[in-house]
Image (tube, rainbow, N blue to C red):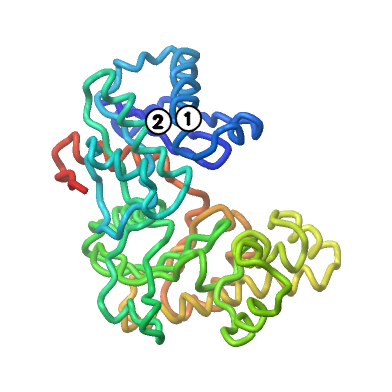
Amino acid sequence: MKVLAINPGSTSTKVAAYESEICLWKQVIDHPSKDINAFPRVVDQCDYRILTILSLLKENGTPLNSFDGIVGRGGMLKPLVGGTYVVDQHLVNVLQNAPGGEHASNLGGIMAYSLGQRINVPVYIVDPVSVDEFEPVARLSGLSEIPRRSQSHALNMKAVARKVASQMGKAYHEVNLIIAHLGGGISVAPHRKGKMIDVNNANNEGPYSVERCGTLPVSELVKLCYSGKYTEQEMRTKILREGGMYGYLGTKDAREAEKRMNEGDLYAGLILEGLCYQVAKEIGAMATVLAGEIDHIILTGGLAYSEFITSEIVRRVSFISPVIVVPGEEEMEALALGALRVLHGEEKAKTY
């Protein structure tokens, strides 16, 4: 079985061809800002991006009709359980209306469906960011008007969970794991017997990351919001794009921050240590969710390539459970394998 995987980002589209579990090729299409900014809405970029994908397939000598299925990144949908979902016209309509907000990931299912219709093959999305497997107690925030929401790097975390479980000789639904995805945003989630039963919302909770503030002192935040210094949009930008390591050091590149630290910049070292410290605290908190019954702690995502960051976290949490480091993101493989599990009859596709 041959699968085409599509993962759109804000200024790029990742495309990969898989035959069974083997990646035949994987490439990133970069979209110039002037092209992307010409479209009023994200969804308006669909036809433009599809043409770039078709051009890439031609360059690689891979005809569109050679695929048995197409899979796209899931978008900002309503809360749903994890798994592989069939993309039909109803789901396309939902993604086009962007119920969870404008986001490049919404294009994944739309583009995949358009291409799938051309060759009459099944189309899927896998583990979108809105995967929600919370237990009722996890939704309580302390303020009745604001329930906690599940929003995370579910695609990569669940892919890594399956891989580590397999290495243990077990299935995902047979293990308990705490997984920390360390990237532009940071998600830390306890996975109990195949379900992600809690997670810090990477946009507004948990550890600070390279650009996001994470959890903030609430009273001081309220004062800042009403100080008259910032508009609502400016505050959102400050929290989501100008906070964390960037707010302290003026860089979103952890490698640069680490280089500064190694060259004697004590402040850079403190900020990096703070990121690790907060991740470790969040892992410790999630250990209580699983009542200490944990097979492994897993560190994944782009920041997990840093030996300093992973070693600092491991130093603080290894007493809880053995730690496994799986650096990088396996999103393309996760998309392909999610579709292949359905095509091979190992899993039944869900309907949105």
Residue 195 vs 13, above or below: the answer is: below
Label number found at residue 70: none
Label number found at residue 23: 2
- Residue 195: x %, y % from top left: 26, 64
- Residue 305: x %, y % from top left: 59, 54
Q: Residue at the location (49% across, 34% down)?
A: 14
Q: Quadrant of the N terminus?
A: top left
Q: Label 1 sits on what residue type?
A: Lys
Distance Cα–Cα, label 2 vs label 1: 7 Å
Q: Label 2 sits on what residue type?
A: Cys
Residue 3, located in which quarter of the rendered image?
top left
Q: Image check: 205 left or right of 178?
A: right
- Residue 107: x %, y % from top left: 41, 38
Nearest the eye: 210 or 86: 86
Residue 9 vs 315, above or below: the answer is: above
Reading the image, the residue beneath label 1 is: 26
Nearest the eye: 162 or 248: 248
Residue 287, located in which quarter of the rendered image?
bottom left
Which dot, 2 or 1, sits closer to the camera? 1
Nearest the eye: 144 or 65: 144
